[in-house]
Amino acid sequence: MFSYVFYLVRWLVILDYYTESFIRKFLFKTSYKIEGECSQCGKCCEVIGVVIPTYITNYKWILAIVITFYEKVNAFKFIEYSQGHKALLFSCNNFDKEKMVCTSYSRRPAICRSYPSARYFEKPVLLTDCTYKVSTKVIY
């Protein structure tokens, strides 16, 4: 029974990812542009931030489901909740710190594939030493 719930939630997350991509591309264009290339330093694999609505933190059982989902489906390990970023912070169990590579790169989750990205109208938050840069696009 529990595996069916995770299967359903996984497909909902995938649907959300593609819906958001469609909305961002065709309906609501973001005013932020991400430039640069990945230096493959692995810092984004050591700390993965999952932004969640504030109200979810008021319901411990919903929060537990969200954390369990990311731990089971994406092989992440929960670190803490960051009040400043309103995000759950995880590390990835598939990241080899010695070789600085992802051991499941071809099967990595959508959150890893889309980093860095803006959610609708919000400015993307980058890690301190990330080689990507965020600039503001001029929209006419």
Image: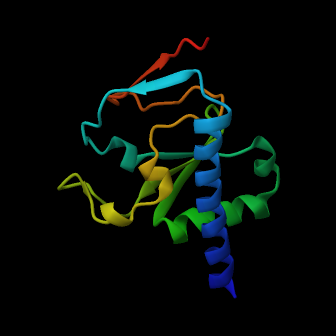
- In the image, taking residue 75 as reference, residue 38 lies left or right, namely left
62 or 126, which lies in front?
126
**Residue farthest bottom in this picture:** 1
Give the residue at x 69% y 78%.
5
| Residue 119 showing in the rendered view | no
Residue 54 on image: x %, y %: 76, 42
124 or 22, which lies in front?
22
| Residue 134 showing in the rendered view | yes
137 or 2, which lies in front?
137
Q: Quadrant of residue 66?
A: bottom right
Q: Is residue 15 above or below residue 73?
A: above
55 or 34, which lies in front?
34
Q: Is residue 96 above or below residue 5?
A: above
If the image is split into quadrants, where does the C terminus sit? top right
Give the residue at x 76% y 49%.
57
Give the residue at x 82% y 56%.
59
- In the image, taking residue 4 as reference, residue 93 lies left or right, namely left
